[in-house]
Amino acid sequence: MTVKTSVLCSVCNSENHSFYEETKALMHKPNDERYRFHRCNDCHTVFLTNPVAESRLEDYYTEHYLPYRGSAPWGRFSSFVDGSQARLDRRRVDVVARTAKTISAPINLLDVGCGNPSFLLAVKQTLNAHCTGVDFSDKGWADEAYRDLNLIQTPFESFETEQRFDVITLWHYLEHDYNLSKTADQLYNLLKPGGKLVVEVPDYQSASARLQKANWQGWHSPRHMTLFSKKGFQILFPQSKWTIRKRLRYGTLDAFTLWWLGVMEKKGVNWTGSMEDEFWPLVGLKVATFPLFLFERLVPMGVQLLVIEKTVD
């Protein structure tokens, strides 16, 4: 059913939108919370219509939030998880290297929503880049290896600096943002002329989202505010200021990861507990679904990646 309400599309501000999906609070302690996503009938963006206040967000980044727990929950299998993270970081470094190949070294890079900043450490070590990370929480920064990185604990909207960056990376950050138009302007002002954004976000128009429905972790309710379409990106990053150089319907994050998290959500896993007992079932599921994810570059399976250039100063 199409509705017109005071709730506006988070990208184009349209009142013309329809109910799309309802979920519980995902990767969170069991409760009665329900979150409703609508799809904009004008730009096809999907957005959360009943978000929590930003001041309450820390309530959803607790011991239930698996990414902040790192490899520790995997016990004797933690080295496999560390290895998987290292491979993900290398893929992201490769994307940055290709994106910045015409930029004189050393590049100046900002990672927005850096979380556990292992990617920044890999960029610094591999590309000899000047690296800055911003996140509203410092819970992922405990490792001594990160002490030499320039990490700033602040909401991105409050981040201020005289620096201008060659590359800004947003690895699964933009879907969390509460004020997209303001953030797009801020990103524009932080980039040098010709600077690049690298944006990776979930793809709600993917096969995995359709199959897993309310358990799909791309919703990540209530942390995710917006799921993007091609048209939505074109509105958020207009040709008057930006050029979308590349949009891929796959990314650096293995789409199987989103799938497995959805399987665990449906199972009702205890996100605060040990994951050791889930390791071999995870391996079995990865083997069983390998033919499905083998073709994720042809059939969208849950992740999309964009490279966007600032074209006018």
Image (cartoon, rainbow, N blue to C red):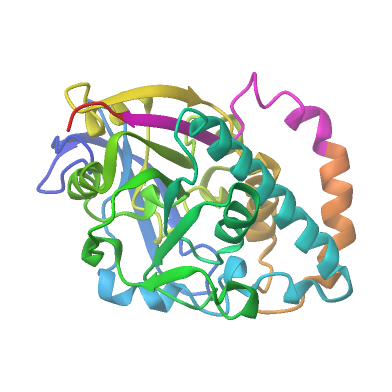
Instruction: Kindly indicate the quadrant of the structure image that contains residue 193.
Output: top left
Residue 120's place in the image compared with 286, above or below, is below
Q: Is residue 109 magenta?
A: no
Where in the figure is residue 138, as x and y percent of width and height? 46, 77
Residue positioned most to the left: 6
Q: Is residue 99 left or right of residue 34?
A: right
Which residue is at the front of the view, 157 or 214? Answer: 157
Q: Is residue 104 left or right of residue 76?
A: left
Where in the figure is residue 73, as x and y percent of width and height? 74, 75
Where in the figure is residue 107, as x and y percent of width and height? 46, 45
Q: Residue at x 51, y 49 (%)?
A: 214
On the question of residue 302 being in view, the answer is no
Which residue is at the front of the view, 205 or 231? Answer: 231
Extent of the magenta region: 289-309
Where in the figure is residue 164, as x and y percent of width and height? 29, 49
Q: Residue at x 54, y 73 (%)?
A: 148
Residue 306's place in the image compared with 191, above or below, is above
